[in-house]
């Protein structure tokens, strides 16, 4: 009788071991199937006026609502959903006047938020090159998937401005790109 019970138990143990291997292999395959979708957000153009800024105080330079059709990205790529989402780059560029540089900006930071969610900082720069016309912000590698999941979110740029500004009006552009990690169905 002991041989009969042993003969029944061995196949069951082998079947359970195979099930464990198959399930863990499926998770590994799913992880391998993950890929990133880059998405360049629309450029945000804005102006700052020299009369609106006080020395050494952080000011809101830009507040813009961005729209991202998450459902169309999911449908177009036959995806299960969008996972972790991070910014790939965030940069400020001076558009005009052409002779102006960032000598007036001492630091800047960028946040994102959505209705019902707090602002989340995604990038900052604490030392702006005064002779440059482009400021590349350092990313905080924060997952913003919950912020963008509804399709509409607010992006804000804060800056510390040192007056006087070199021109009466400075036209700037915020350029940014996000990277969404996704899994196929």
Image: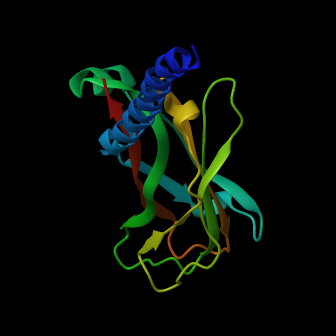
Q: Left or right of 108: which side holds 90?
A: left
**Does residue 110 lie above or below 32 as drawn?**
below
Task: Name the one closer to the observer, 43 or 37.
Answer: 37
Front one among 183 and 95 = 183
| Residue 91 coordinates in the image, percent (x, y) | 44, 63
**Side (left or right) of 141 relative to 77:** right
Tell me which corner region of the image, top left, top right, bottom left or bottom right, holds residue 63: top right
Near-viewer residue (124 or 86): 86
Asked if residue 169 lies left or right of residue 162, the reply is left
What residue do we see at 35% from left, 33% from top?
A: 183
Residue found farthest to the front: 1
Q: Which residue is at 66% across, 69% downward?
A: 161
Image vertical order of residue 158 relative to residue 6, above or below: below
What number of labels is visible? 0
The quarter of the rendered structure image containing the N terminus is top right
* Color theme of the render: rainbow
Picture coordinates of residue 124 (x, y %)? 60, 64
**Residue 103: percent from the left, percent from the top?**
55, 81
Can residue 108 be seen here? yes
Q: Quadrant of the C terminus?
A: top left
Residue 39: x percent and y percent?
Answer: 32, 44
């Amino acid at each position: 009788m002991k041989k009969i019970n042993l003969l029944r138990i061995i196949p069951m143990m082998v079947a359970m071991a195979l099930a464990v291997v198959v399930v863990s292999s499926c998770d590994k395959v799913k992880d391998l199937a993950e890929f990133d979708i880059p998405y360049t957000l629309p450029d945000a153009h804005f102006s700052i006026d020299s009369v609106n800024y006080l020395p050494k105080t952080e000011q809101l330079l830009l507040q813009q609502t961005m729209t991202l059709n998450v459902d169309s990205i999911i449908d177009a790529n036959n995806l299960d959903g969008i996972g972790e989402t991070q910014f790939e780059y965030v940069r400020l560029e001076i558009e005009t006047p052409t002779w102006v540089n960032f000598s007036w900006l001492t630091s800047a930071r960028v946040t994102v938020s959505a209705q019902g969610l707090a602002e989340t900082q995604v990038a900052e720069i604490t030392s702006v090159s005064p002779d440059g016309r482009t400021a590349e912000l350092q990313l905080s590698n924060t997952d913003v998937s919950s912020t963008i999941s509804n399709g509409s979110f607010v992006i804000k740029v804060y800056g510390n401005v040192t007056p006087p500004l070199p021109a009466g009006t400075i036209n700037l552009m915020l350029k940014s790109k996000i990277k969404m990690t996704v899994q196929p169905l």
